[in-house]
Amino acid sequence: MSMSEEEMKAMLAQIKSANPGMPESMRLTVRYNKELQKITNCTEEPIFMGVGGTFYYLLMNVFMSHPEIEQQYPPGVLLFNVNGCPPKLHSPLFDGDIIEFGVLGGEV
């Protein structure tokens, strides 16, 4: 069952109030090209993660949410952009970043 963005924000606020030492969260937008939309059933989705997170951490979370992507597309076939630039696995992400997922030979 998927949570709405408002439910996610409320849950994060509750967790944060119960754990004052918890790092701040950031909101990212993940967009999928047409090929990947067939798997994800959405054009884009919000992702919340702790400040200081990297592209690799985001990638692993997307693969956990949509394992069919990793199963259907072997390494080297997927394309990624963070705010229009190809990321490295260790690239830091920042609040408001837009991450685009695509498939080689298709638009990103």
Image (cartoon, rainbow, N blue to C red):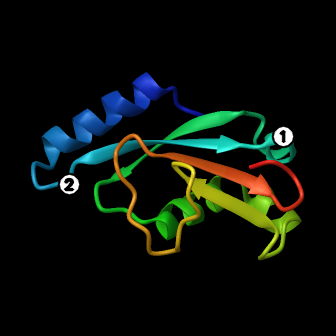
Q: Position of residue 43 (x, y in %)?
A: 71, 33
**Residue drawn at the location 29% of the way across and 46% of the way down:** 25
**Is residue 73 rendered to the left or right of residue 53?**
right
**Label at residue 23:** 2
x 89%, y 58%: residue: 105
Location of residue 31 with respect to 72 vertically, above or below = above
- Per the model, the C-alpha gap separating discs 1 and 2 is 34 Å
Q: Is residue 18 among the parts visible in the rendering?
A: yes
**48 horizontally vs 19: left or right:** right
In the rendered view, tell whether residue 24 sits above or below residue 14. Answer: below
**Tag 1, which secondary structure?**
helix
| Mark identifier at residue 34 | 1
Judged from this view, the residue extending furthest toward the left is 20
- The residue sitting at 51% across, 59% down in the picture is 58
- What amino acid is at disc 2? Pro
As drawn, the label of residue 77 is: none
Say which of 107 and 26 sits in front: 107
Residue furthest top in the image:
6
Residue at far front of view: 85
Q: Classify mark 1: residues with Cα within 10 Å, few (<14), some (14-19) or many (20+).
A: some
Tell me where residue 107 appears, x and y as whole percent: 81, 48
Amino acid type, label 1: Lys
Q: Specify whether 12 is left or right of 65.
A: left
Residue 1 visible (yes or no): no
Mark found first going from the N terminus, 1 or 2: 2
Query: Toward the viewer: 83 or 24?
Result: 83
Q: Is residue 61 left or right of residue 35?
A: left
